[in-house]
Amino acid sequence: MILGFSESALQAQALAAALDLPYAQVAVHRFPDGESRVCVPQPAAGHVLLFRSLDHPNDKLVELLLAAQTLRQGGARRLTLVAPYLCYMRQDIAFHPVKP
């Protein structure tokens, strides 16, 4: 099963179709104070792929962690993150030359 978030639903659905896997969407509700309520479809046992691009990562990472925790509690045995854009990679050593 592939679970995606609303902002990347088209890409996640395309991947699900290419892999011949079912697709479902993670529902996120944002409260006025900025908190998020994350709901994942159940049941989600076995292997679940979570699809989310991590541009603008601060809110997205928290929601992703909440979704992963809920999936684990719901019986998912294996989680795989598919992140077309992985945040914080610009801080890699390639951008900070090593001095001899």
Image: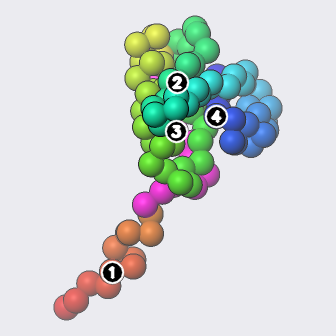
Q: Residue furthest front?
A: 32
Q: Which residues are magenta?
A: 77-88
Mark earlier in primary sequence (3, 2)? 2
Residue 42 seen anywhere in this rendered image of the structure: yes
Give me the C-alpha separation between circle 2 and circle 1: 37 Å
- Which residue type carries mark 3? Leu
Mark 4 surroundings: few (<14), some (14-19) or many (≥20) residues within 10 A: many
Q: Marks 4 and 2: in contact by CB < 8 Å?
A: no
Give me the C-alpha separation between circle 2 and circle 4: 10 Å
- Which residue type carries mark 1? His
| Residue located beneath label 3 in the image | 81
Mark earlier in primary sequence (2, 1)? 2
Q: Is residue 81 magenta?
A: yes
Q: Secondary structure at mark 4?
A: loop
| Residue located beneath label 2 in the image | 38
* Front disc: 3 or 4: 4
16 sits to left or right of 46: right
Mark earlier in primary sequence (4, 1)? 4
For residue 96, the mark is 1
**In the figure, 42 relative to 79: above or below?**
above
Residue drawn at x 74%, y 43% as measured from the top left: 11
| Residue located beneath label 4 in the image | 5
Residue drawn at x 59%, y 48% as measured from the top left: 53
Q: Position of residue 67 (x, y in %)?
A: 49, 26
Residue drawn at x 59%, y 42% as measured from the top left: 52
- Which part of the image, by quadrant, shows the N terminus? top right
